[in-house]
Image (cartoon, rainbow, N blue to C red):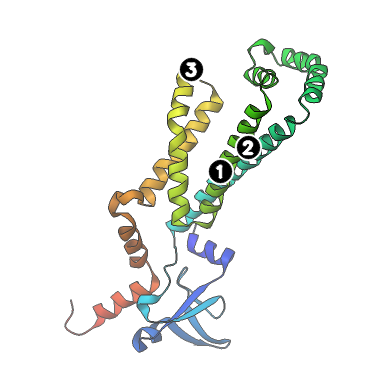
Amino acid sequence: MDWSLFGCARNGHVTYAPSEPELRERLAAPTAAGLAWRCLRCGAFATDGQHGSGPAAEAPLVRRGKELRSELLLRVFSVERFLRFLVLGAAAYGVWRFRYDKAGVQRAFNDALPVIRDLYRSLGFDIAHSKLLGFIQHSFTLNSRALLYLAAGLAVYAVIELIEAVGLWLGRRWGEYFAMVATSVFIPYEIYDLTVKVTWLRVAAFMVNLLLVIYLVWTKRLFGVRGGKRAYDARLRAESVIEVEQAAMLAAEPGRH
C-alpha cells in the first residue's frame, strides 16, 4: 500500500514553490488546468491542495511513507485512550453523584443484587469472588470526603487519558512524550497487579501499554534515542521531495561523480 497516496487522498496534497529558480523549475509543470507543483507527500504533480512558497530550507517537513503508517497506528492508540477517558470520566461523575444520594444508590443496589447473583451463577462465576461487586459494596462504607477524593482522582486520570488521546491523534511531539511518560508511570503498578493475579484483561492492558512505550521511544527517537529529534528531523528531510531534487541537481552538475 502506498501510504503517501493514502495520506493525500485523506488530507489533500501539500505543494511548495521554492524561491531557487532551478529547483523551482524541477518542481513545476504546466498543465491545461494551470501550473502544477509536485506534492511534498506523494510526489505527484497537483494543482490543488495546500500551497506554500519561499526558500527551500523553509519548506515544511511532510511525513511520507512509513511515517504515515506510524501516524495511523498512533491514532489507533489515540482512540483506545479516548475510550478510557470516557469510561473514567463516567466513573468520576458517577462517584461524584453518589456522594449526594448514597442511601438511594445503596437501596437500588441491594434490590438488584439477587438479579446480579443469578446472572453471575448463570455465567459460572462465584459472586463472592467478584472484585467489582466487592468494590461497590466497600464504597458504601466511605465517607463523603473519601468519595470526593476518589472522584477527583478518577477525573485527573481521565484528563490524562484525554491529553494522551489528543496528542497522539494530532501526531505532535509533545503528545508523544506525554503519552510515553504517562503510560510508563502505570507500568510498575500493572506488573505488581500481574504478580497478584494473572488475567487476560490485565495481560492485554499491560502489553498494550508496554508496546506503546517501546514503539514511541524507538520510532520517534524520544529522549535522545537513536539520535533524538535532530536525527528524526534529518531523516524526514532526507526523504522529502525537495531534498531528493536538490541531491539530483548536485549530482547532475559537471565535474561531480
Percent from the top left, x then y, of residue 177? 43, 49
Identify the amino acid type marked 2: Leu
Q: CA distance from mark 1 to mark 3?
A: 25 Å
Mark 2 or mark 1: which comes first in sequence? Answer: 2
Q: Are marks 2 and 1 in contact (CB under 8 Å)?
A: yes
Q: Residue at x 56, y 52 (%)?
A: 166
Q: Secondary structure at mark 1?
A: helix
Name the foreground residue: 172 vs 185.
185
Task: Point out which mark residue 161 bears.
Answer: 1
Q: CA distance from mark 2 to mark 1?
A: 9 Å
Residue 70 appears in the rendering: no
Task: Point out which mark residue 196 bears.
Answer: 3
Identify the amino acid type marked 1: Glu
Percent from the top left, x then y, of residue 107? 81, 20
* Image quadrant containing the C terminus: bottom left
Q: Which residue is mark 2?
A: 88
Counting other residues with Cα less than 10 Å from the Cα at mark 3, is it few (<14), some (14-19), or many (20 or more)?
few
